[in-house]
């Protein structure tokens, strides 16, 4: 089985690839250099005190006791206040910039984000489709994320593109991101959310406007259900088992408790963007999901809208082959 390896796309906040990330990076360096100046100043004064007032042999003398120095106390109170005020101004400005809604003239693309244990759901209301774990965006265009959680607290973070923002059940939070150049940018849930927290990743595909429009047009198409062959048999199995949790647009499968599978074959990964999307990996996943990703399907409560992992349905080899054949048609 091939796990997704993103070594060529490091999760580095120090290599910004968009204006939001660059704003945060600029703030980081302002705070860093102020902190560095304070550090060296304090260490310098400390070293002077150590060497100048150290005890010397043969020159023992009583140390003069000081019971108060108004001037000194004012200095060491005012200086930290000034430093904190200097840091507060760009910090608050940055927070307002990255959390405020883009101006209407910027033609921002709105994406609704829902965090689940342990995968991400991305809804494109302007286009009317939903996908999972892989976020496609056009370059040079603001993306306005409206985020919430279906279960516990998660945190959305794609370091090269934006800052971290908590995703909380029952609340809505917002974040703006933008990519300057086409490419793949990797993110991660940054708030511990249970057993498979480390396997709740994000892959952002920044594309040219034309490529994004073509992708969106493809995603708007309903699934085509095969009528013959192994894939048709797979649809029968799907209708018996998988419809309890999954949606396939254009079919009777409309339960939204697990990732939307309408165009699964068009994605590069699955299982929280942790496993390469190949027929071999799909078969291994369907055979025993928890062997590939730690989950708790024994705690599933579909009637309450809570799914904590795909169970092992003990599918036969033929059922596995048929389901893989079906899923490979969902392009």
Image (tube, rainbow, N blue to C red):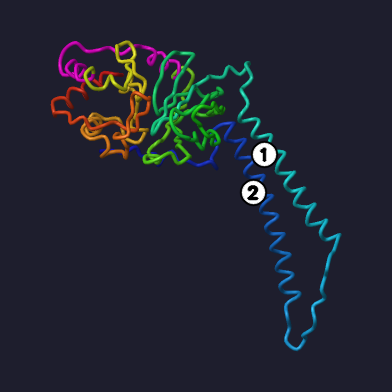
Residue at image point 32% right, 40% down: 294
Horizontally, residue 45 falls left or right of residue 106, namely right
Residue range of the region highlighted in magenta in the rendering: 212-238
Name the residue beneath numbered marker 2: 32
Instruction: Please tell me whether residue 217 belongs to the stretch shown in magenta.
Output: yes
Q: Which mark is residue 91?
A: 1
Residue at image point 83% right, 56% down: 74
Horizontally, residue 331 falls left or right of residue 91, namely left
> In the picture, residue 224 is in which quadrant?
top left
Q: CA distance from mark 2 to mark 1?
A: 12 Å
Up-down: is 199 above or below 49?
A: above
x and y percentages locating residue 283 in the rendered image: 21, 30
Most prominent secondary structure in the magenta stretch?
Answer: helix
Question: Looking at the image, is mark 2 or mark 1 earlier in the sequence?
Answer: 2
Task: Locate the C terminus by quadrant.
Answer: top left
Q: Residues within 10 Å of mark 1 (few under 14, many from 20)?
A: some
Q: Nearer the viewer, residue 115 or 143?
A: 115
Residue at image point 53% right, 27% down: 171
Instruction: Please tell me whether residue 311 belongs to the stretch shown in magenta.
Output: no
x and y percentages locating residue 37 in the rendered image: 70, 54
> In the picture, residue 87 is in which quadrant?
top right
Question: Under tag 2, what secondary structure?
Answer: helix
x and y percentages locating residue 14 in the rendered image: 55, 42
């Amino acid at each position: 089985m091939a796990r997704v390896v993103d070594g060529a796309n490091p999760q580095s906040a120090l290599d910004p690839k968009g204006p939001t990330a660059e704003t945060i990076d600029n703030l980081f360096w302002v705070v860093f250099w102020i902190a560095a100046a304070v550090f060296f100043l304090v260490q310098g004064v400390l070293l002077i005190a150590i060497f100048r007032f150290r005890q010397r042999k043969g020159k023992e003398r009583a140390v003069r006791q000081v019971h108060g120095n108004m001037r000194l106390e004012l200095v060491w109170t005012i200086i930290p206040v000034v430093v904190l005020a200097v840091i507060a101004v760009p910090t608050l400005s940055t927070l307002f910039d990255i959390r405020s809604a883009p101006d209407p003239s910027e033609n921002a693309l709105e994406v609704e984000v829902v965090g689940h244990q342990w995968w991400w759901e991305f809804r494109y209301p302007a286009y009317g489709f939903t996908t999972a774990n892989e976020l496609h965006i056009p370059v040079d265009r603001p993306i306005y994320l409206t985020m919430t959680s279906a279960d516990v607290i998660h945190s959305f973070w794609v370091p090269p593109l934006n800052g971290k923002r908590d995703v909380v059940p029952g609340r809505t939070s917002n974040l703006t991101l933008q990519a300057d150049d086409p490419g793949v940018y990797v993110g991660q849930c940054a708030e511990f959310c249970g057993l498979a927290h480390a396997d709740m990743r994000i892959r952002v595909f920044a594309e040219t406007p034309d490529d994004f429009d073509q992708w969106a047009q493809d995603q708007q198409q309903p699934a085509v259900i095969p009528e013959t062959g192994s894939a048709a048999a797979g649809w029968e199995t799907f209708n018996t088992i998988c419809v309890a949790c999954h949606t396939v647009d254009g079919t009777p499968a409309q339960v939204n408790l697990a990732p939307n599978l309408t165009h699964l074959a068009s994605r590069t990964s699955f299982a929280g963007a942790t496993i390469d999307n190949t027929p071999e990996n799909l078969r291994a996943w369907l055979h025993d999901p928890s062997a590939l990703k730690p989950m708790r399907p024994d705690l599933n409560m579909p009637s309450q809208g809570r799914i904590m992992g795909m169970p092992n349905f003990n599918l036969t080899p033929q059922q596995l082959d048929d389901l893989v054949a079906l899923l490979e048609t969902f392009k």
